Amino acid sequence: MNVIDLESERERIRQILKQADGKNVFYDQGTISGTVPVLWFDYKSFAADERVYNMMFLFVSEGGN
């Protein structure tokens, strides 16, 4: 998976979150360059009577068994 794939995943996740709760508020998004590119976005969601600020980070990791 490369940065372009991560961008598609980020948008897919944002759409899922929007569909899950239309009250979610999305603020910003960006990319951190480096040996392992990291894409992020932040949003506000709601739990019971409280607001929850969320930061979502996406990156590719190689793993073993």
Image: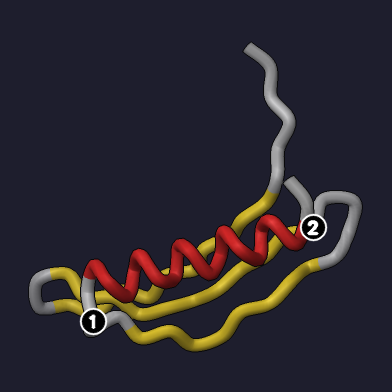
Query: Percent x, y for residue 34?
Result: 89, 59
Residue 48 or 2: which is nearer the viewer? 2
Which residue is found at the position 27% from the left and 71% from the top? Answer: 19
| Tag nearer the camera, 1 or 2 | 1
Q: Residue furthest right?
A: 35
Mark 2: which amino acid? Pro
Q: Earlier in the sequence, mark 1 or mark 2?
A: 1
Q: Quadrant of residue 5?
A: bottom right
Query: Percent x, y for residue 41?
Result: 55, 73
What numbered label is drawn on residue 37? 2
Kindly identify which residue carries mark 1: 22
Left or right for 51, reference 42: left
The vertical placement of 15 against 1, above or below, is below
Q: In the structure shown, which secondary structural element does the residue marked by tag 1 occupy? A: loop
How far apart marks 1 and 2 lie (CA) works out to 29 Å
Residue 51 or 42: which is nearer the viewer? 42
Mark 1: which amino acid? Gly
Query: Percent x, y for residue 29?
Result: 61, 79
Q: Residue furthest left?
A: 48
Q: How many marks?
A: 2
Which residue is found at the position 22% from the left and 74% from the top? Answer: 21
Q: Classify the position of the N terminus by image quarter.
A: top right
Left or right for 11, reference 49: right
The vertical placement of 64 against 31, above or below, is above
Number of other residues with Cα within 10 Å of mark 1, as a class: few under 14, some 14 to 19, many 20 or more? few
Number of other residues with Cα within 10 Å of mark 2, as a class: few under 14, some 14 to 19, many 20 or more? some
Q: In the structure shown, which secondary structural element does the residue marked by tag 2 occupy? A: loop
Q: Quadrant of residue 52?
A: bottom left
Which residue is found at the position 61% from the left and 68% from the top? Answer: 40
Q: Classify the position of the C terminus by image quarter.
A: top right
Q: Quadrant of residue 26?
A: bottom left
